Image (cartoon, rainbow, N blue to C red):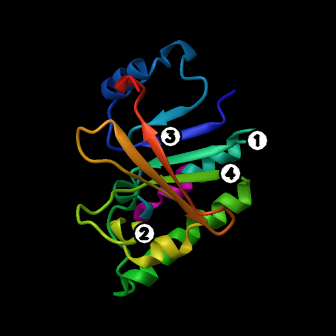
């Protein structure tokens, strides 16, 4: 039984099939997750779709939204304060995660500029990072097969890990 949903909003079915095949996961027949490539935005009721999916499932585990920016859609303009808007948006995800006992993984883009604090390379206000329970940031230069994974959050020990692509031969 499928216990995960992946809103792959920057993909189409052909691209998803190709990526799954590249990862060697096509034999699983997608039994581990349900992919959705089109959704209403958050501003237009997208959380209702996720809520309905979670209600239909027995013991759901994971919701992936790839990407947060695509899911956000038109911004909530009731406040001109970016921090308040980001914090309010993240609070909605947090309430849903707690209500269903699921992990909600939000994929978000980084800024291209370097920063001394890895949280400062996230393309958002500190309302997004300040409201998330755990943040994973993968830093990798384009075309490189090595990356650094930064992990920080409320209930995790802050850490950094070196990652190497299996294709690198290391």
Estimate how packed mark 1 is, as few (under 14), some (14 to 19) or many (20 or more) residues with alpha carbons within 10 Å: some
145 relative position to 64: left or right: left
The answer to which of marks 3 and 4 sits earlier in the sequence is: 3
Query: Of circles 1 and 2, which is in front?
Result: 2
Name the element at disc 2. helix
**Which range of residues does the magenta coloring cover?**
43-49
- For residue 21, above or below residue 151: above
Q: Which residue is mark 2?
A: 119
Name the element at disc 3. strand
Q: Which residue is mark 4?
A: 102
Residue positioned 39% across, 62% down in the render: 72
Name the element at disc 4. loop
Expressed as whole percent of the image width and height from the top left, the position of residue 48 reads 55, 56
Q: Which residue is mark 1?
A: 59
Residue positioned 65% across, 69% down in the render: 154
The answer to which of marks 1 and 2 sits earlier in the sequence is: 1
The answer to which of marks 4 and 1 sits earlier in the sequence is: 1
Residue positioned 39% across, 84% down in the render: 78
Q: Which residue is mark 3?
A: 6
Expressed as whole percent of the image width and height from the top left, the position of residue 19 reads 37, 26
Tag 4 near tag 1, CB within 8 Å: no
49 relative position to 140: left or right: right
């Amino acid at each position: 039984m499928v216990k995960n949903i992946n809103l792959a909003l920057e993909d189409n079915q052909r691209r998803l099939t190709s990526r799954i095949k590249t990862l060697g996961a096509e034999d699983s027949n997608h039994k581990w997750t349900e992919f959705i490539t089109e959704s209403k935005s958050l501003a237009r009721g997208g959380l209702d779709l996720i809520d309905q999916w979670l209600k239909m499932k027995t013991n759901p585990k994971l919701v992936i939204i790839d990407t947060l920016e695509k899911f956000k859609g038109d911004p909530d303009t009731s406040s001109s304060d970016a921090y308040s808007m980001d914090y309010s948006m993240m609070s909605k995800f947090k309430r849903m995660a707690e209500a269903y006992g699921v992990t909600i993984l939000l994929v978000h883009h980084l800024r291209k500029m370097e920063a001394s604090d890895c949280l400062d390379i996230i393309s958002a206000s500190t309302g997004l990072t300040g409201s998330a329970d755990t943040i994973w940031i993968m830093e990798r230069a384009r075309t490189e097969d090595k990356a650094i994974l930064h992990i920080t959050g409320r209930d995790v020990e802050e850490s950094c890990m070196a990652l190497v692509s299996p294709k690198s031969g290391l």
